[in-house]
Amino acid sequence: MFPVTNNITLSSSAENYNTKSYLFDFDIGDFVIRDGKLIECDGLEAIKVWIEKILRTEKGRYKIYDETIYGARLEDLIVGNNYSVEFIESELKREIEDALLQNPKISSVTNMKITREVNSLTVELEVITSDKGGNLITVTV
C-alpha cells in the first residue's frame, strides 16, 4: 500500500478533542483488538490515526468514499508520469495540505519537506491543531 509511513510522533500534551477513533495497526492492516474489543483512542492519538489513514487512502479509489473528498491523490502524481520534479513536489504539498485541512481539528500544515529517493518519497511535515494550545504533531511518511 502507498505511502508507507515510517514514523508519526507527537510533541505536545493531549487536550480533550471530543473525538473518538479506534487504534489501527497500519503494518498489519487491521484494527488493534484486545480481549475481543476494538481499542479506542481520542485526542491527539485519534488525530494521528486519522492523518495516517487519510494519507494512505488514495482519493477516488474505494467505493465507500465515492460521495466524499476523503483521501489524497498522491499516486497519480508520482507513478507513470513525466512531470517535472518541481511540479510533483508542489502538487504533493498542495494535495497533502488540502487533505489534512479537511479535519476541523487541524488548523495548519507547516514545514513540509519532500525528499525524493530512487524508489520512494519521504514527506516530513508538522500539523498544528486548532485547540487553544495549538498542539504540534510531527509526521514522517
Image: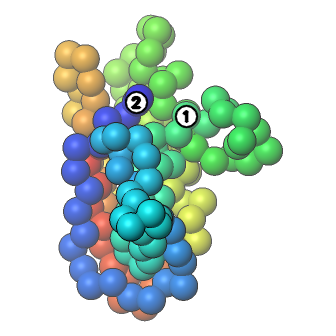
Q: Is residue 115 above or below residue 16?
A: above
Q: In this orientation, which residue lies closer to the viewer: 130 or 50?
A: 50
| Amino acid at dot 2 | Phe
Q: In this orientation, which residue lies closer to the viewer: 46 or 32?
A: 32
Tell me residue 134's x, y (percent): 37, 82
Residue wearing tag 2: 2
Instruction: Determine contact: label 2, label 1, CB under 8 Å.
Output: yes
Instruction: Please tell me how crowded label 1 is: few (under 14), some (14-19), or many (20+) other residues with Cα within 10 Å.
Output: many
Asked whether, in this view, residue 71 is left or right of residue 69, the answer is left
Q: Secondary structure at mark 1?
A: loop
Give residue 37's mark: none
Q: Is residue 129 visible?
A: no
Residue wearing tag 1: 58
The disc, 2 or 1, on the residue closer to the chain's N-terminal end is 2
Q: Is residue 71 visible?
A: yes
| Amino acid at dot 1 | Glu
Tell me residue 60's x, y (percent): 67, 33
Quadrant of res 104:
bottom right
Q: Quadrant of the N terminus?
A: top left
